[in-house]
Image: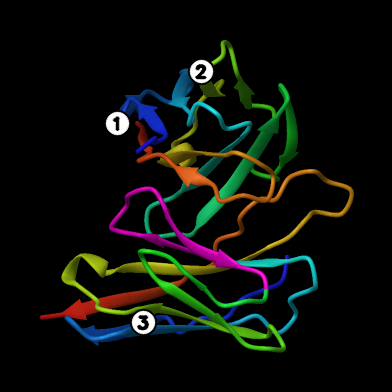
Amino acid sequence: DAKTTQPPSMDCAEGRAANLPCNHSTISGNEYVYWYRQIHSQGPQYIIHGLKNNETNEMASLIITEDRKSSTLILPHATLRDTAVYYCIVRGLRSGGSNYKLTFGKGTLLTVNP
Amino acid sequence: EPEVTQTPSHQVTQMGQEVILRCVPISNHLYFYWYRQILGQKVEFLVSFYNNEISEKSEIFDDQFSVERPDGSNFTLKIRSTKLEDSAMYFCASSEGPRTEAFFGQGTRLTVV
């Protein structure tokens, strides 16, 4: 799976948009970009994923650059409850395999401040 | 909203004892996973399971670990002879398909003393 690079931490003011960047310059054509978050030591929570088009759901928007080498997760109106570690994961098919495991890195600790 | 449930939420066991961690995946999901997270460290993949067999396992998943789907609803992780270093949060996850999003349970905190 392609490696991702994220800043270790970011701050955001409550009510503002939080923009979390991720670099994945070695991504290949069949690999998706997934975003999860983890609040304290709870189970990772799925946020959104995409292949090459921008995606939006009720939680967030995902912007993927045209060359697919980087992406940005956007939380449009961050709240205190959005404070968490956010993981950008490139998910692909293991050679000869049939399963797509998620490989977690260290992620970005987003702190939303009042 | 359907969710993955794990029991127990916290398990304390003596070194050398066997433990079984239980998970009920989302009902129409066919792909199942176990991950673990040692305190302060990354979430690590252990094993994936589909069609009653292991699809992939990591180096962590050695002979002391086993997984089973004993009936139509449960998915279990067994650690045969626990070691101190097995102390961690263990997360179960499931997905409908191999490429669809995986949903995680809230985890079981295993403490080996």
Mark sitting on residue B73: 2
Q: What stretch is highlighted in magenta?
A: A35-51
| Front residue of A95 and A14 | A14
| Residue A44 lies in the magenta stretch | yes
Q: Evaluate whether label 2 is on the same chain as label 1.
A: yes
Subunit of mark 3?
A
Identity of the amino acid at label 3? Ser
Q: Do the residues labelled 2 and 3 touch (CB within 8 Å)?
A: no
Q: Mark 1 points at which residue?
A: B10
Q: Evaluate whether label 2 is on the same chain as label 3.
A: no
In the rendered image, the residue lying farthest to the top is B71
Subunit of mark 1?
B
Position in image of residue A74 (x %, y %): 40, 79
Q: Mark 3 points at which residue?
A: A9
Position in image of residue B48 (x %, y %): 66, 38
For disc 2, the neighbor class at 10 Å (few under 14, some 14 to 19, many from 20) is few
Identity of the amino acid at label 2? Ser
